[in-house]
């Protein structure tokens, strides 16, 4: 699985080296060489939950700690319950982010030759690798709960890099659009998932 010739290793290396090229080659039919987007998503989510389990880490509890609240005094309200539900079931909700990101990608980069399904392929890789960065940075919360904030700028920078490399452009305007795309897609994803869970709980 982790040999230098395995699809997982090739996928992992290429996501650091040139994520846009990985997606373009996968879309073009070079699929045995790389992990499929959903397979890589499952791998990174499992890694994230393993790290969380080993550290007994919960992002909602960590947010409460950053506000100076003791966990035993945590209020019981729909927002807190929704946060815990989303945290425990994030693997079911993250694909929504990939779908939303692909929609914004189509809107912002409408001149690119990719159809919506091909953009979803790329955004699935992008979201999956964002989860990997989340898993990688979670142990820093042992030092301080505030270290959890580090993952957000890292994820934003990663998404910008991933989108600009996918569209094979390095222009300042492309970077600006990728930044807005990253922020807007995440905001809409949170609004959809959090709003839905609050209504259902």
Image (spheres, helix red, strand yellow):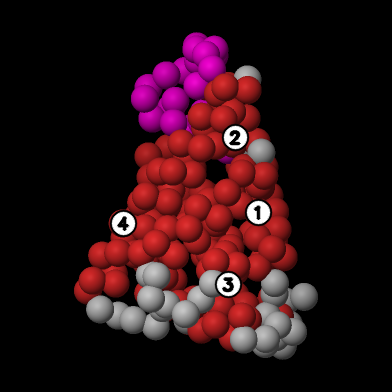
The residue at the point 39 percent across, 62 percent down is 107
On the rendered structure, is 10 left or right of 137? right
In the rendered structure, find residue 126 and report the number of the disc placed on it.
none
Q: Which residue is mark 1?
A: 45
Q: Which residue is mark 2?
A: 86
**Which of the image's four quarters has the C terminus?**
top right
When the figure is inspected, residue 34 is found, relative to residue 42, above or below; the finding is below
Q: Earlier in the sequence, mark 1 or mark 4?
A: 1
- What is the x, y in percent for residue 156? 38, 58
Q: Secondary structure at mark 1?
A: helix
Q: Earlier in the sequence, mark 1 or mark 2?
A: 1
| Magenta segment | 57-79
Q: Earlier in the sequence, mark 4 or mark 2?
A: 2
Alpha-carbon neighbours of circle 4 within 10 Å: few (<14), some, or many (≥20)? some
**Which of the image's four quarters has the N terminus?**
bottom right
Q: Which residue is mark 4?
A: 180
Residue found farthest to the left: 172
Between circles 4 and 3, the one closer to the viewer is: 3
Q: Which residue is mark 3?
A: 118
- What is the x, y in percent for residue 164? 37, 74
Q: Earlier in the sequence, mark 4 or mark 3?
A: 3
Q: Earlier in the sequence, mark 2 or mark 3?
A: 2
CA separation in Å, label 3 and label 1? 22 Å
Between circles 1 and 2, the one closer to the viewer is: 2
CA separation in Å, label 1 and label 2? 14 Å
CA separation in Å, label 2 and label 3? 27 Å
């Amino acid at each position: 699985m982790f040999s230098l010739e395995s699809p997982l290793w090739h996928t992992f290396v290429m996501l650091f080296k040139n994520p846009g090229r990985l997606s373009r080659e996968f879309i073009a039919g070079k699929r045995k060489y790389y992990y499929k987007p959903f397979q890589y998503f499952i791998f990174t989510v499992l890694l994230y939950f393993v790290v969380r389990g080993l550290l007994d880490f919960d992002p909602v509890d960590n947010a409460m700690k950053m506000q100076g609240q003791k966990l035993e005094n945590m209020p019981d309200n729909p927002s807190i319950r929704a946060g815990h539900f989303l945290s425990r079931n994030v693997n079911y909700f993250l694909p929504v982010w990939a779908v939303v990101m692909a929609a914004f990608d189509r809107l912002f980069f409408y001149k690119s030759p990719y159809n919506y399904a091909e953009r979803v392929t790329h955004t699935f890789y992008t979201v999956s690798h964002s989860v990997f960065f989340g898993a990688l940075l979670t142990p820093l919360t042992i030092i301080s709960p505030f270290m959890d904030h580090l993952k957000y700028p890292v994820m934003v920078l990663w998404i910008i890099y991933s989108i600009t490399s996918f569209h094979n452009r390095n222009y300042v305007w492309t970077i600006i659009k990728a930044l807005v795309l990253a922020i807007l897609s995440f905001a809409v994803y949170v609004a959809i998932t959090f709003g839905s869970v609050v209504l259902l709980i």
